[in-house]
Amino acid sequence: MRDFKEMWEEIGLNVELHNQLIENMTNLHTKMYLSQKNRPKSIVRFDHSFHSSHKERVAEVIEYRKSGKKSIGTFCIYVPEEIALAADVLPIPLCGGTGWSVNFADKVLPRDICPLIRSTFGMAFSNTCPYKTLKDLAVGETTCDAKKKTWDLFGFYVMEVPQMKNPIDRELWFEEVFKFKEAMEGLSGVKITPEKLCETIKLVNRRRKILQRINEFRKSPNSPISGIDALLISQVALNQDIHKFIENAEALVDELKKRAESGISAYSNSGKRVMIAGSPSPMGNAKIHWIVESSGLQIVADESCTGMRYYRDLVDENQNDIEGMINAIADRYFAIDCACFSPNTERMKNITQVVKDYNVEGVIQNILQFCHGYNVEAKVVEKTLKGIGIPSIKIESDYSEEDIGQIQIRIEAFSELLMSA
Ligand code: BJ8
């Protein structure tokens, strides 16, 4: 097995602290993922990708950059990957999901902001994020207040995401996407051609389509894949080399097809079908998914940016010139229904549709602590669900393990309520 110590030292990591982080991630993976009884065999490819995110994947990024190619760090699914890739710029998602790193952020950021931001910057400040020095530009966006003020602090490039969905907002967004294209060309010195952009639009769509196919299986009464494993796949999708991910995901689809035909379920119980909705769960965070499924419920849909919000919509592939393509990209990203939009009626329509399509019997709103957008919007989600006869529960939590017991009690009570409904 390759020893990565030298590589970590070369990119400036604090190897001692980084070893602690790796140990923490390994323990989490063993406890939450490997403890499942009936996983598809090809899921080991994704287990491997989880572990390689600070090892082989880092080596790949270093290799990529050796030829002078550029990379950017991103924190949100509003950053159009197609455009970066078309300029030969590699996007690397940097959202932190580990509770281990949150306290390291406290020397610069307030404690009462969401754990996703604290974890991300905690890794950066403790020199345990391998991608900290492997990017030429950090690309932030004006979604929530905590994020946009943090980008200011560090002087990041910022895309202005409008907060409403009127025609004037769509115009602003198109300009932002166009400016981003110019920024990527400026960074890499590579002019984006219609041919190249068309190619990367199709490539990123392929990743979304394969995620759609994997998640289609969850509509079955005997889902061949668990909700926590579906989360793992989504997390890996954003981290792994896109071609490798598609190859691994295709192998998984073949296996899921066979399992579905033979009626092999990932679950040994017949728990109620639930959806997780709300804040994202970046790699390293699977706490709520794990509690929910180990309490006997089946997560059949995930309405978050580490779920269907990432793969639901595709970019139109039928445009011939750059302007048409940028417009198509802008439209696709403008359809994202993040809670930073007000009003967010699209999200309510989408949730209602998913409940129907996936035969969802109950919804768990997973709200990261201090994520005011999703937290306040939870009332509207609850009302929407009530209107269609679907019970829901809101869980507000961070990345720590302290509240696991308390959440377990609430989820078990919710499960009983669904059983008696
Ligand atoms: S499109 S959800 S990835 S902004 S959890 S940092 S919102 S306080 S991550 Fe997000 Fe883009 Fe929206 Fe998705 Fe703020 Fe909430 Fe923290 Fe968040």
Image (cartoon, helix red, strand yellow):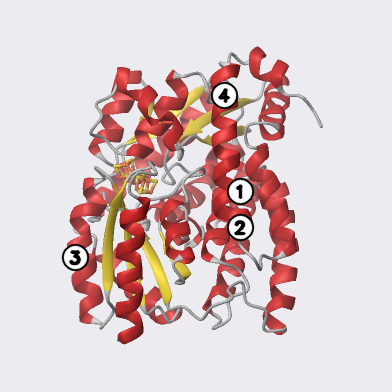
Q: Which residue is mark 4?
A: 18
Rounded to the nearest angstrom, the CA distance separating label 3 from label 2 is 36 Å
Secondary structure found at label 1: helix
Rate crowding at label 1 as few (under 14), some (14 to 19) or many (20 or more) other CA atoms within 10 Å. Answer: few
* Residue 308 visible within the image: yes
Rounded to the nearest angstrom, the CA distance separating label 2 from label 1 is 6 Å
Horizontally, residue 360 falls left or right of residue 413, namely right
Instruction: Pick the quarter of the image with the N terminus.
Output: top right
Frontmost residue, 134 versus 404: 404
Which mark is nearer the camera, 3 or 2?
A: 2
Q: Does mark 1 have its CB less than 8 Å from ligand 1? A: no
Secondary structure found at label 3: helix
Which mark is nearer the camera, 3 or 1?
A: 1
Residue 236 image position (x, y, % from top left): 60, 48
Rate crowding at label 3 as few (under 14), some (14 to 19) or many (20 or more) other CA atoms within 10 Å. Answer: some
Secondary structure found at label 2: loop
Q: Say which label, 2 or 1, has the lower sequence index.
A: 1
Q: Which residue is mark 2?
A: 35
- In the image, what residue type sits under mark 4? His
- In the image, what residue type sits under mark 3? Val
